[in-house]
Amino acid sequence: MKTSIRTLLAIVCMSMLVSNSFANEESANPVQLNLKAYIRSTLSFMSGSNFNAETLMDKVKNQPNTARVCACQVLTLKNNNNEFENVALFSERTNYGDLTADYKTASQLLVTENKHLKSFFFDKVEVVNKINAPTDCVSLYLKMKSQNDELKLYDILNADINRVKK
């Protein structure tokens, strides 16, 4: 009895595979890029959790369709226990037409965040590379990640938020 059930199950599976392998009247389409799966597979930082991937996807979904500028710093972070290299910190701002002012605002936020990282979490925060681009930070990250597999995303900060300075 078990053998006949296994045989029947094998025949059903084979027929499903054969019937799905033909294009029939439709044309064969290339595999569509699943952006969420791609981002989830490329992101890994410290614990390798999917938290950064979900945060990044939320930012992509909620982002208005406006021109953006992005400032990025690639960092080396060191404390007593660990050393993290190729950590990318991004700051994104809406492009209001004055690129110099927009880049300056985004870069100032990165400097402030570096001070917080150093005072709260790391003994040494070293800036290895600085990049400014007239694009959104998700696109810049994906481009940088395609060139350097060891790049880790720390965060994408929103430089449009007004912050109170004390």
Image (cartoon, rainbow, N blue to C red):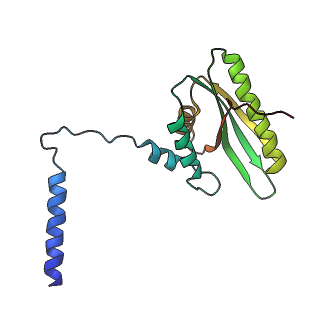
Q: Residue at x 15, y 47 (%)?
A: 22
Residue 49 position within the rendered picture, expressed as x and y whole percent measured from the top left: 58, 56
Give percent across and percent down for residue 137: 59, 33
Q: Which of the two residues, 2 or 56, is positioned nearer the viewer here? A: 56
Of residues 2 and 109, the one drawn nearer to the viewer in this rendering: 109
146 shown above or below 44: above
Hey, which quadrant is residue 31 in on the image?
Answer: top left
Q: Residue at x 53, y 29 (%)?
A: 64
Q: Residue at x 80, y 33 (%)?
A: 164
Q: Is residue 123 visible?
A: no
Q: Position of residue 10 (x, y in %)?
A: 17, 69
In the image: residue 149, left or right of residue 104: left
Query: Dividing the picture into quarters, in which one does residue 107 lie?
Result: top right
Q: Residue furthest right?
A: 166
The quadrant of the rendering that contains the C terminus is top right
Asked whether the viewer can see residue 24, the reply is: yes
Decide which of 45, 107 is in the foreground and name it: 107
Residue at 78% x, 50% y: name it.
78
Quadrant that contains the N terminus: bottom left
Q: Is residue 84 above or below residue 141?
A: below
- In which quadrant of the rendered view does residue 6 lie? bottom left
